[in-house]
């Protein structure tokens, strides 16, 4: 499978005018990734609350970027999200993910969304390594 970044990803694609256009920062030495952002009203679920699918998407993206600190290309094989409390719109979020294990072609990652240090959502993900295992 060939993975091509055409800069139209819903989360990180700078050319996707309908997307969030925010890219997680990779901390390769610590096998992690993170980003800060505030979710605009366009991504609302219930009144004043971020849609849960958007939160899952942010966790998925940040988990992928944490894995990309180890290898060039990954895709999500599995992700489980636990929502702890509603996330308010237009409030700065911190999304963080770190690698917790690796087995052959799978990188296991844990992620969380926090506001002012309080956890609002958590994720466990398995990222599938695409291509060469030598990285």
Image (tube, helix red, strand yellow):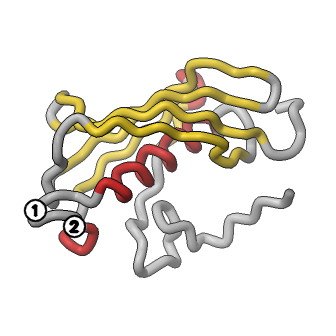
Residue 27 shown left or right of residue 58 in the figure: right
Residue 5: name its quadrant. bottom right
Q: Residue at x 41, y 79 (%)?
A: 18
Q: Relative to residue 65, is residue 49 depicted above or below?
A: below
- Tell me residue 108's x, y (percent): 61, 27
Horizontal side, residue 99 vs residue 97: left or right: right
Total labels: the figure holds 2
- Report the residue marked by disc 2: 44
Tell me the residue at 74%/43% (across/down): 72
- Rendered image quadrant of residue 38: bottom left
Q: Which residue does the numbered mark 1 point to in the structure image?
A: 48
Q: Nearer the viewer, residue 114 or 86?
A: 86
Q: Is residue 46 visible?
A: yes
- Give me the residue at 87% from left, 33% from top: 133
Residue 91: percent from left, percent from top = 14, 53
Helix, strand or loop under label 1: loop
Whether residues under marks 1 and 2 lie with C-beta atoms below 8 angstroms apart, the answer is yes
Mark 1 and mark 2: Cα distance apart in space:
7 Å
Q: Position of residue 3 (x, y in %)?
A: 77, 60
């Amino acid at each position: 499978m060939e993975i091509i970044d055409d800069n139209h990803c819903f989360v990180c694609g700078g050319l996707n005018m309908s997307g969030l256009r925010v890219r997680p920062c990779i901390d390769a030495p610590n096998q992690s990734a993170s980003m800060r952002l505030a979710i605009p009203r366009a991504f609302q679920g219930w009144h004043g609350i971020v849609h849960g699918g958007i939160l899952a998407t942010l966790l998925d993206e940040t988990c992928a970027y944490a894995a990309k600190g180890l290898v060039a290309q990954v895709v999500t094989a599995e992700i489980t999200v636990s929502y702890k409390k509603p996330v308010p719109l237009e409030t700065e979020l911190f999304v963080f993910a770190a690698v917790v294990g690796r087995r052959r072609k799978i990188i296991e990652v844990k992620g969380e969304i926090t506001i002012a240090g309080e956890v609002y959502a958590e994720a466990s993900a398995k990222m599938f390594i695409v291509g060469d295992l030598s990285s």
